[in-house]
Image (cartoon, coloured by chain):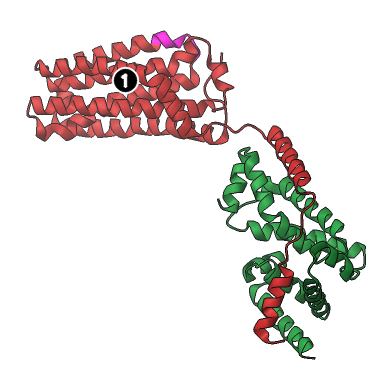
Amino acid sequence: MRDQKLEEKLQSVLGQKECPVRLQKTIDQCMRITREQRSLQPEERTGFWQYLSDVLRFEGMHILGLHAVILLLACAAVWSAVDILRIPAFMPLFVLAVMPVFLRSRYYGMSEIEAVTRASGAQIILAKLLLAGAANLVSITIVLSLGVSAQSAYENIGRLVLYCLVPYLVCMSALLRIVRLSPRGSTLAYAVSMTGAGVCWGIFAGTKTWIYETSAMGFWIAAFLLFSAFFVREICFIIGSRREGKLYGIID
Amino acid sequence: MSDDELVRQIRLGDDGAAEELIRRYYAAVMRYCRWHCSSAEKAEDLTQETFLRLFRSLPEYRGRKKFKAYLYTIANHLCIDESRKVQPVPLEDGENIASECGELHQVEDREEVRQLLDRLSPEQREVIILRYGEQLSFAEIAKIMESNVRTVQSRVRYALQIMRKASYD
């Protein structure tokens, strides 16, 4: 037998088809196994991005609606020649706009139900924070751009960003801390204090103008770094809780 | 649809994908088992058991285009277990095959190949069946036999040399 002929013969003989008799029985039994396995499989937790899209669907309108109202107020104030240094007074109001979304479940006593859903508590907060942060960023950028262009204060833009970010970080860190540590009753107190903080900041900017002078830049940078650290610490805590799948915040 | 895609669909609960996967490989696995068994009925048993084991272990299967090797590894292990239980006996008498297939020359060819395979060591016989019967790549055979590709290649080469020499004689 020649070499090639041998290989051809091997292929033809070894590859001869067999006639399956129990094929259907095998298929039925395999399907029974897969059905059994499916019924025993634990249900998967909702992925973060899917959860984010769900949060956007349910909370997006509230976040964007309240932001639009405050943005309109802020733009109107800036347009009617309000002192540019009073723009930071709107920062607590922007945080106030996202407050209902963060504290609603606690206010209505639904935290426990939220905690036993397929997403962890930290995941819920992180998703809301992402949406709220994006809305805040857009609104603050619009107000700042409008303020700077209306009053042609282009050289002060760096300082103005710091003036806005410091109150924003203070209020946002406080909000996250309240979500994590404070009991249910503090919701209203927080709403009042946010509004109060906005008013105080406005008065402060009008009366204590020396603190906005160039010589005080060090104070603003120090404040920015300090409150950034607080804010980052809260975010790290949320991310850590999310990874470990822990419950987040106080459930009363 | 690729094998790995079918496995993914089965995991998602698609019964049609399960049926397609079984139909795709049933005859091939049965043919493979048939070369290791004394009877067609035993080969059917081993084939069925191969698929049942495959489906039981499917949640642990980690794709990466190695499904064929994974399936034949299960079949190979079952065939080895079976060969330990009973001594291999001649495939079957020519009369039976003739009545099944109706082609006498096929019986002759099959008998001739069987005689040639009998001259090989178990490892050499296995690589020849997987290479020429199941058309598997050297890499797939190496994975099934828990060996490296070079060893498989040399086993095929030596096996062919022995078979050529025997056929000249």
Residue A40 left/right relative to B169: left
Q: Is residue A204 shown to the viewer in this render?
A: no
Residue at which label 1 appears: A64
Q: Is residue B77 shown to the viewer in this render?
A: yes
Q: Does the stretch in magenta take in A184?
A: yes
Where residue B82 sits in the image (x, y, percent)? 87, 61
B108 lies above or below A216: below
In the rendered structure, the colour chosen for chain A is red
Q: Label 1: how many residues lie within 10 Å, few (<14), some (14-19) or many (20+)?
A: some
Q: Which residues are magenta?
A: A183-189
Quadrant location, the N terminus of chain A: bottom right
Where residue B141 sits in the image (x, y, percent)? 68, 68
Residue B64 left/right relative to A50: right
Which chain letter matches label 1? A
Q: Which chain is green?
A: B
Out of B104 and B15, give the one closest to the viewer: B104
Out of A110 and A205, give the one closest to the viewer: A110
Where residue A232 sits in the image (x, y, percent)? 40, 34
